[in-house]
Image (cartoon, rainbow, N blue to C red):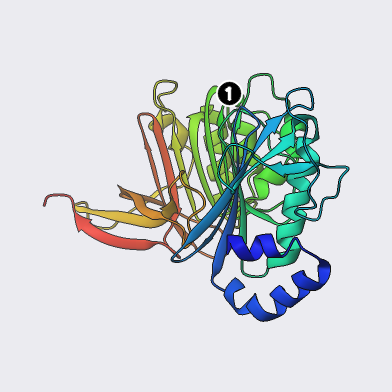
Amino acid sequence: MYEVLILSFCSKRTRYLIHSLQKYRWKAIKFVHYSFDENDKICVSVRSENSSVGFSLSPTTLEKTMITPMDVFGMGPTIPIRLHPNLSKRKYLFNREQKQLVVQGIHDYLHQFLGSSTINYVVDTTGHELPQNLKNIKRTCIKVSENTTAEELEACFAASPNQEYIQIDGHFNGNLCPNSAILGAEHLRIISNKGHGDEILLGFRGKRFDCDCSFHDATIVQFLNEWKSNRGFHNLESLIINSYMSKNYDAAAILKDIDVKQLDRPQDTLHITWQTRYAYPIAVDPPKLRKVGFSSRDYLLRDGDGVEASVLIQNHDVCFALWKGNSCEVKNING
């Protein structure tokens, strides 16, 4: 695959010929993974079910190394890239000051060369650096640096809203822009030990929400009331909140004014489970999943359509999941 990519740099005619002869191979490609670290290094991996090829680009400056221009990834001499002189053929050098242009050029080239209909393009930052705004990204995992503003974070998703999976980690303080594109992710995972996640939960528009941060009790009450009254969270299938070391929830106070039902037989509990994605690596297709869930006797009935959802509030945890679309099993709590 890498050799084919190198040949595609020769000319537009060569690239067209390769695409015509090899496009059947593109069907096996599952994703293109971009990884960025704190040293401005760029790693690109193209993977199919049975193989993986990749290359990396390391930053330099014109003062350190004179970069002889190469016409690679569709970028001409104005954005010089060259093979690393002392390392393998899959390592390149680029001008650090042109990093954004280089990343954009590589993504545009691969997207045009390989296509996008069946390929997942994913972004992973490991060095507390925000990724740039790229189109057609399906999954993103970001480690946020300190003092990152909501506007700076939002800018990363402007071209690729409503992603399949977004994880935000690092020094995230819980602040997002109103009606943020992040809140439209199908599966959103938030890891934060700063601030509260109230606005994130109340604005979430996706299916699955996992959050390791604290919430005010009033926010949990508002969420449950809005779902039960059929006024919001119509897409939500599951919610897991873990506020370990930061919050202990008062279940009795939260549920006292909500019409909570219980299973008919006192010895029964409902064990509800579903498959969720591992945080790392995000570039796995099919996605690497693990089974999660909880057991509870309490459940809610949604007004209007009677949809059932189990709810559990215990110590540091708040759990909520629809019966429909998840795996449900009634178990005897006595054995």
> Dividing the picture into quarters, in which one does residue 82 lie?
top right
Left or right relative to 149: residue 47 = left
Q: Quadrant of the N terminus?
A: bottom right
Left or right relative to 25: residue 244 = left
Q: Residues within 10 Å of mark 1 (few under 14, many from 20)?
A: some
Q: Say which of 333 and 290 sits in front.
A: 290
From where the camera sits, is residue 317 visible? yes
Residue at the outermost left position: 335
- Image coordinates for residue 36, horizontal then vertical, percent: 62, 37
- Against 127, is 89 above or below? below
- Image coordinates for residue 335, horizontal then vertical, percent: 11, 52
From where the camera sits, is residue 256 visible? no
State the residue position of label 1.
171
Q: Say which of 333 and 244 sits in front.
A: 244
Left or right relative to 99: residue 173 = left
Q: Say which of 77 and 226 sits in front.
A: 77
Q: Amino acid at mark 1?
A: His
- Against 163, is 312 above or below? above
Left or right relative to 169: residue 92 = right
Residue shown at 64% from the left, 19% from the top: 146
- Image coordinates for residue 89, horizontal then vertical, percent: 59, 48
In the rendered picture of this protein, how many numbered marks are placed on residues? 1
- Image coordinates for residue 138, horizontal then vertical, percent: 63, 55
Instruction: Determine whether the residue tagged by mark 1 lies in a helix, strand or loop.
Output: loop
